[in-house]
Amino acid sequence: MTAEGENDGLRQVLLHERSRLLRFLAARGAGDEAEDVLHDLWQRVASVAGQPIGEPVSYLFRAAENLMRDRRRSMVSRQRRQHEWHSTSTSTEEEPLGERVLIAREQLRQVKDTLATLGPRAELVFRRYRLDGVGQAVIARELGVSLSSVEKDLQKAYRALADLRTRFDAE
C-alpha cells in the first residue's frame, strides 16, 4: 500500500469515528472547540508519513489526546507570558510617553483600516475568533458558511496583518 493509501485509510477511520472523537475531545475540556481540534487532527493525519498503523482507532484517540495536551500547554504558556508581560509593563514609575501613545493609536487605526478593507465577513470572523475567543465551527454556524470559508477568512486577515506588521517594523 502506498503512503497516500495509508493516509486515505486513516482518514476513513477518522470519519467513521468522528462522533466518538468529538465526545472524547469534549470530555477532555475542548468544549465548543472540539470541532477545531478534530480539524487539527484531520490535518495531522493528512501530513502523516505513510507508515502502516496497526491500531488506527487507538492511534487517532492518542493523537487527539496529544493535541489536547498541546493546546493546554500552549494556553498555560500564553497565560503565563501575558501575566509576566502585564506585571513588567505596568509599573507605577513608568507611564507611557506621549509619543508612544500616539504611535500606538495610529497603529491601531491602521490595523482597523486593514481589517475593514478585507470585507465585512473576514473582519467579523477575525474579531469573533481572535478577540472574542469564539471557535471557528461556532462562527461558521453563526454566519451560515463552511468551516473552510472561516479558515480562509482568517488566513486572509493574518496575511494582511503580517504585511502591516512588516511595514510597522520597517518604520
Image (spheres, rainbow, N blue to C red):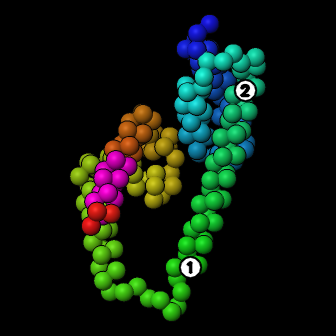
* Distance of label 1 from label 2 (alpha carbons): 43 Å
Q: Residues within 10 Å of mark 2 (few under 14, many from 20)?
A: few
Q: Which residue is mark 1?
A: 88
Q: Judge whether residue 115 is colored magenta.
A: no
Which residue is depicted at the point 63% across and 59% down? 77
- Find residue 11 and report its image quarter: top right
Q: Secondary structure of the magenta portion, mostly?
A: helix
Which residue: 54% across, 31% down? 43
**Which residue range is magenta in the image?**
157-168
Look at the numbered disc 1 and give the secondary structure of its residue. Answer: helix
Looking at the image, do the residues carrying marks 1 and 2 touch, with CB atoms under 8 Å apart? no
Amino acid on which disc 2 is placed: Tyr
Q: Which mark is residue 59?
A: 2
Relative to 45, 108 lies left or right: left
Quadrant that contains the N terminus: top right
Q: Is residue 11 visible?
A: yes
Residue beneath the point at 33% across and 74% down = 104
Can you say whether 37 is above or below 132 in the image? above
Q: Is residue 63 left or right of residue 125?
A: right
The nearer-to-camera label among 1 and 2 is 1
> Given the current orientation, which residue lies at the most extreme top position?
1
